[in-house]
Amino acid sequence: MSDKKEKKVRVRIAPSPTGTLHIGTARVALFNYLFAKQCEGTFILRIEDTDLERSEECFEKNIIEGLQWLGIKWDEGVLCDQEQNHIGNYGPYKQSERTDIYLKHIKDLLSKGKAYYCFCSKEELKTKKEYQMSIGQPPHYDEKCKQLSAEEIEKNIAQGEPFIVRFKTPIKKIVFNDSVRGKVEFDTNLIDDFTIAKGSGESITPLYHLAVVVDDQEMEISHVIRGEDHISNTPKQILLQEALEFPQPKYAHLPLILGPDKSKLSKRHGAVSISEYQQEGYLPETMINFMAFLGWNPGGKKEIYSIDELIEEFSLECVHKGGAMFNIQRLSFLNAFYIRKKPLMELTELCLPYLLAAGLIEETNEGEFKIKETSETIDIVWLSKIIQAYQERLKKLSEIPELTDLFFKEIEYDKELVRWKNMADEDIRKALDKAESVLEKIEAEDFNKENLQNLIMPEAEALGAGDRGKLLWPLRAVLTGKKASAGPFEIIEILGKEKTMERIEKAKTLFK
């Protein structure tokens, strides 16, 4: 914890808007957020959009909305607000708006001979690389342009020749202490004169390594907490920091998230973006709890943590070095837990969009709801009873239409589904007659779970301990048309007397 006290903690998440918010990026954002909050530091959202060809506004919006949905709030950074596009005093927080800042440092490196123009074409570089590989050499730049004269450079620039700016990599060892991995060493003999900018004529566009180093300096970033896929970038960025005489932030490289086959998590393993998990009906508190344990564990048996508890417990010292296995079963278990804890009316509101999208219900102009198939008006209280009956069964919100469609449409009966074990048609008919005779005695206003259970269960128990299903199974099957559902008494109470009797009568015609 000592490094937190050396200076004010300032951390950042810096996604590129070239795709939707990946769960790996969200996990990195969470760890930065927890670290900042724990030590009363500052958490910054910076958009790294130097790749203008692939960066899109829709992806930036997706990233911002995804972090907001998760409840990961940043103290400084980009906003999606028409009146205010960022908060904080270190902006702008989009790299595309910081070009002048970068150009000053690029020119500084060029003037001091720490970087140089390279006019080699892509085709030329590709040919050299293929040749080196063909003779068993590791591909590397042959430094052809390193010795160009000032006159040659000026001539090429004046003619509008496309170029890149290469950093002159000194031969040395880079050693840094990683808060997760410990002492890390790199030999710069293995690092080419890497690219920090590109352009043509008088136009120069900064590239990733230069931009990130300048931004971290200008925004006074104290700790860089990111995925281990960036660890190979660290020596290059340290070299730039040294060349520009910038202080070095403290580094912590988090383990990658791995799929079931132990390869890096990707689309072939299933959903990978936060918006996909949101659409599938995972809750934000589920995602926070799940992501926190991807590569981190405080020890002990406790598995359920609120965000405040995570802030209290989090430490980089407890981050694992090995890859973090993504377990969808674990994610679904956590989501079911949080769904069960949701207040009923809040859960009902969360389920409504899925029922609407499935075409089971529709909203009227007056803000009411009706069953689409029958145009019957329904209210939120009736819908909440349906949700309550399935709250214990839900693993994700998107399951609600398939589980509950029996309340919103006519049922097509599968005769064999109604059959309990080897019951004959005549016996099934008698069971349904028995259930019907009991239900007919109950007034519509008394059609509640308790009364239904008190009257029907004795009839079922009378058949013997192992034979209750002879009455209960056919009854539940004809009411739901499903192999699995909520209990028959909850179903009957929600359907009401009229619909219940109609379904029993319709089903009885199968067993004449």
Image (spheres, rainbow, N blue to C red):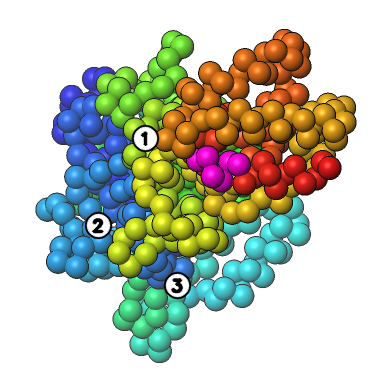
Where is the C terminus found, in terms of image quarters? top right
Name which residue type carries label 3.
Glu
Residue in the picture at 19% in, 58% down: 86
Q: Earlier in the sequence, mark 3 or mark 1?
A: 3
The x and y percentages for residue 418 are: 76, 36
Name which residue type carries label 2.
Val
Above or below for 172 versus 76: above
**Residue 298 drawn in magenta:** no
- Is label 2 or label 3 in front? 2
Residue in the picture at 36% in, 83% down: 201
Element carrying mark 1: helix
Q: Which mark is residue 344?
A: 1
Q: Which mark is residue 53?
A: 3
Question: Hey, which quadrant is residue 399 in on the image?
Answer: top right
Name which residue type carries label 1.
Leu
Is 280 on the left or on the right of 317, as rendered? right
Q: Earlier in the sequence, mark 2 or mark 1?
A: 2
Element carrying mark 2: strand
Is 284 on the left or on the right of 35, as rendered? right
Query: Mark 1 and mark 3 in contact (Cβ < 8 Å)?
Result: no
Q: Nearer the viewer, residue 48 or 503?
A: 503
- Residue 48 shows in this picture: no
Start-end of magenta stretch: 496-501
